[in-house]
Image (cartoon, helix red, strand yellow):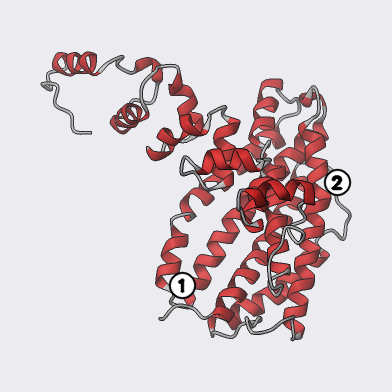
Amino acid sequence: MAALNKDIQLSAEFITFLRSGFYAQILFEQALSTLEVKLVPEDYLETAHKAFDKIDVWINDLATELPIFSASWTTPETFDAIAAMSYMRELKKDLQWLIPQVEVALRTQNLAQNRDAVKLLVAALIRSAAARSSYVETLHSIYTQLKATDLAQQVSYELEAAKEYVNVTQIILETFSVTTTYDPDLCEKLRREASLTPCDFRAHIHDTSILLNVYAKEFSFELAEIPKDEAQGWIDLRVPAVAAGYWRAYNFGAEEFMEWRNMGITGAPLAANWRRARFSPREAVGWIREGIPPVLASQWLSTGLEPTRVAALLRRGITDPSKAPRSAREEEDDNQADGDGGQEDF
């Protein structure tokens, strides 16, 4: 089919975000229940379930090219559009409530001795992963139903990684739900893994601000909830409020953003993951080009090998840096000793 019209595109984005947000909220509550921690009230999911009743109808309508929003409006004009806006505000409010609690848990000393803090971090990881996975899966499904093949294909590239990380968080949940005594080293690994979840949630809040103000003439720094004195730094560098909000969510200032952008790294979550691994933009870019994640790059960094060389070794099946040939000459000698004549096509 032809490119989606603006009404369908806007409705798809709005509905997809709502569905992923409330789905993640449900999994968050389920994780807390599995871990047997009381953090949320009994009616915590009441809004989520009401929203899903509507969202299911909206998705079915969208499949028949019936949108809930019109790009020509200046304000929501139908009951469905008004309801969607209301649900978006509720989702934003819940994220604003959650962030400070996760940040307190992350700052907890002797984390292994504070079981509730550990459990909250596990549940936060579940929520963050579920939101991303649900978003790409729902958007892919909607685009597929609408026969928007190119858009569905673009989203499909993210499906595998999103699902894989959900599986990782489920393993983490199982690990902490079956043990009676928390290992301090394991808890510190959890702290590191969960360290970006408040940033993820702040980015989601920025998403809600953008969607809630879709009929504003301009998405300003005020609408992005960035203070005037801080906004000026972004304005001076001609960074729009939409982009500034995402990078600010991951604790990047305007100058630091420019350092990453100048190296061709334009995704805030990607930059945040590399910064967490203590890579500068210049150090990170080579590894990114080779598709090597921060956790692997950190392990190989001490070998002194270039990212291109490490990528070739990984393709060959050498995953342990201590077993890597120290030079191309040494590898050639090894190959000849193995009787393969030193021929290897990387």
Could you tell whether 20 is left or right of 299 in the image? right
Mark 2: amino acid: Leu
Residue 306 vs residue 234, the one in the foreground: 234
| Residue depicted at x 43% and y 77% | 147
Residue with the mark numbered 1: 144
Say above or below: 114 vs 119.
above
Residue 4: image location, x then y, percent? 49, 78
| Dot 1 alpha-carbon crowd within 10 angstroms: few under 14, some 14 to 19, many 20 or more | some
Disc on res. 39: 2
The quadrant of the rendering that contains the N terminus is bottom left
Q: Quadrant of residue 135?
A: bottom right
Dots 2, 1 in contact, CB < 8 A: no
Relative depth, front residue between 205 and 192: 205
* Tag 1 secondary structure: helix
Q: Which badge, 2 or 1, is on the more N-terminal residue? A: 2
Q: How many marks?
A: 2
Question: Residue 251: where, in percent of width, then height?
Answer: 68, 40
Q: Is residue 65 visible?
A: yes
Q: Quadrant of the C terminus?
A: top left
Q: Is residue 312 above or below residue 110?
A: below
| 185 lies left or right of 88 | left
Please state the horizontal and vertical placement of residue 247, each as a whole percent of the image: 63, 47
Q: Residue at x 60, y 53 (%)?
A: 238
Q: Tag 2's secondary structure?
A: loop
Q: Position of residue 277 (x, y in %)?
A: 56, 29
The residue at 64%/28% (across/down) is: 189
Q: CA distance from mark 2 to mark 1?
A: 38 Å
Q: Amino acid at mark 1?
A: Thr
What label does residue 59 carry, if any?
Answer: none
